Amino acid sequence: MRPLLPHCSRSAYKAKSRITSASRLVIPILRHGWLNAEGSSRNVPAPFQLAPSKLGWSKGVVLDDYEFSGATARLSPRHVPPSGYLSVEISRGRTPVLTGYAKA
């Protein structure tokens, strides 16, 4: 077994080692703001790479050296038909740590 990177969960390490070419760039945008777990607003996070889960692009693992590396990100379309704008929820385990909007 390979050693885990100190800042990555096991699933993030597996995703990073086998799916880097299939990752998707997610670009956070201001829109209605970003909220942390306490419900306080915060600055827009930096763009990040997302590796898809078995469910496809609706859920994935945040890659790279990023403040939320190894966390799970859930993406849902903001409009029907999809416009490329997404609602984003980043969580660690079952605890949401950040919500906001992005373009991908």
Image: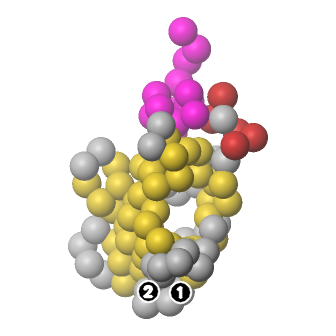
The mark tally for this picture is 2
The quarter of the picture where the N terminus appears is: top right
- The amino acid pointed to by label 1 is Leu
Q: Residues within 10 Å of mark 2 (few under 14, many from 20)?
A: some
Residue at point 39%, 64% (across, down):
89
Between 9 and 6, the one lying in front of the other is 9
Residue 27 image position (x, y, % from top left): 63, 71
SS at badge 2: loop
- The amino acid pointed to by label 2 is Gly
SS at badge 1: loop
Q: Residues within 10 Å of mark 1 (few under 14, many from 20)?
A: few
| Circles 2 and 1 in contact, beta carbons < 8 Å | yes
Tag of residue 30: 1
**Viewed as shown, does residue 88 lie left or right of 27?**
left
Magenta residues, as a range?
1-15
Label 2: which residue?
A: 33
* Quadrant in the picture for residue 2: top right
Residue 12 image position (x, y, % from top left): 52, 36
Residue at point 63%, 68% (across, down):
104
